[in-house]
Every structure is written in structure tokens, then in C-alpha cells.
Amino acid sequence: CKDLIVATNGYTGNLTPWLKRRVIPIGSYIIATEPLQPELMEKLFPTNRIISDTCKVVYYYRPSPDKKRILFGGRVSARETDPAASGPKLHNDMCRIFPELKQTKISHSWMGTVAYTFDELAHTGCHQGIYYAMGYCGSGVSMASYLGMRLGQKLLGLPQGKTAFDDLPFPTRPAYTGRPWFLPAIVSWYRWRDQMQMSTR
């Protein structure tokens, strides 16, 4: 083929070791509630918006597109876990924010892998003839669509393909091979820092 694009983000594997060394795969866990009464949905989400907190170990939540359920996501433990185990923990966290949901059941629990970078920036560019776009740091729903479109335009030679993320230095760390062995310690530190900051508010 003439051009090759790698856009694997949190699923970057051994086929592209240079890229694998530059992204940190992190599990993100989500639950969906059972259908809720319209009055309760209107009370909890009067503006029908997506909400995210400002912590380093972030929680995010929104109404489902049909505005019948709540989708609630976040990081539930320092180590990766199974959605069957993460679901009850996320339910507890959700009820801490929305006490009205204490008796609400969960219908679905799942997880996916996002990718962070060492400089906390998304990256797009070309390395040894392979184009890439990845490292969205938890904002992949919007950023992956945007950078994917721009990268396609760039390969077509269109001027609107240029972005502020093009060919930025893409850092890694010595001895890092793509397996984030340090993640439990980092997540525990961030969670402790979040708790300290919240206790002073």
C-alpha cells in the first residue's frame, strides 16, 4: 500500500514497538443503570449534559442518548480489574454523587482501554513511513475523530489537514516497553492527592 496509518491508541501492540513505548494503556470502567423515571433524569441532568470532575482519578457521567439511563464511568482501583468487580464499586461511587440512586440497579458493566502519554498531549505524525494518531488521554471520543479526519486530509494533500498536534516530540521513558508496571503506584498517589484536595474545599 502507499500509506499506512496506525490509530490503535490504548490497544497499540507489539507490531509497532516504537509507538507502544510512547503510550500508557489504562483501563476505563463504565456502568449503565436500569431505565429511570423521566422526572428523576430531569432532576439529575436538567441540561442533559456530560459531566466530568476535575480530579486526576476522574469520574465522568451522562444521560444515555435516549435519556432513560445514566452512564457512569471512572477508575475504580489502582490495578486493572474485571467489569464484574468494577460494577459494584462504580455503583457506590455513583451513589456518593447521586444519593437518589441508592436503590437503582445496574444493567451493564464494561471496560475499555484508553491511552495516556508522558506529556499528556495527543500526538499525530509520521515515523519511518508510518503515520499515526493516538494518545488522547481520556478524550478519544472527540479527539480521535478530529485527528483521524485531519490525518486523512493530510494524506490527501489537503491544507486543512494541518493541526497543532503535528509532529510534536513524542516522549517515552528509559526501559519503558509499553507495560505500565508503575500504574498502581501512580493511581494510588493521585487518588490520595485528590482526597487531600477535596478535604480542603
Image (cartoon, grey):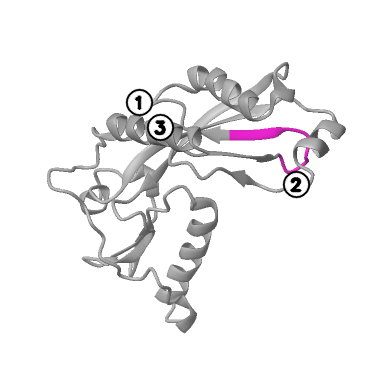
Disc 1 residue crowd, few under 14, some 14–19, many 20+, Cα 10 Å: some
Q: Amino acid at mark 2?
A: Asn
| Residue 74: % across, % down | 51, 34
Disc 3 residue crowd, few under 14, some 14–19, many 20+, Cα 10 Å: some
Magenta span contains residue 69: yes
Q: Is residue 170 above or below residue 103?
A: below
Quadrant assignment, res 66: top right
Disc 2 residue crowd, few under 14, some 14–19, many 20+, Cα 10 Å: some
Q: CA distance from mark 3 to mark 2?
A: 28 Å
| Residue 132: % across, % down | 34, 61
Ranked by sequence position, the earlier of labels 3 and 1 is 1
Mark identifier at residue 112: none
Quadrant assignment, res 81: top left
Residue 177 appears in view = yes
Quadrant for the N terminus, please: bottom left
Q: CA distance from mark 3 to mark 1?
A: 13 Å
The residue labelled by disc 2 is 48
**Circle 3/circle 1 CB separation < 8 Å:** no
Ranked by sequence position, the earlier of labels 3 and 2 is 2
Q: Amino acid at mark 1?
A: Arg
Secondary structure under tag 2 reads loop
The residue labelled by disc 3 is 191
Residue 6 appears in view = no
Q: In this rendering, would 73 be left or right of 63?
A: left
Magenta stretch bounds: 64-72
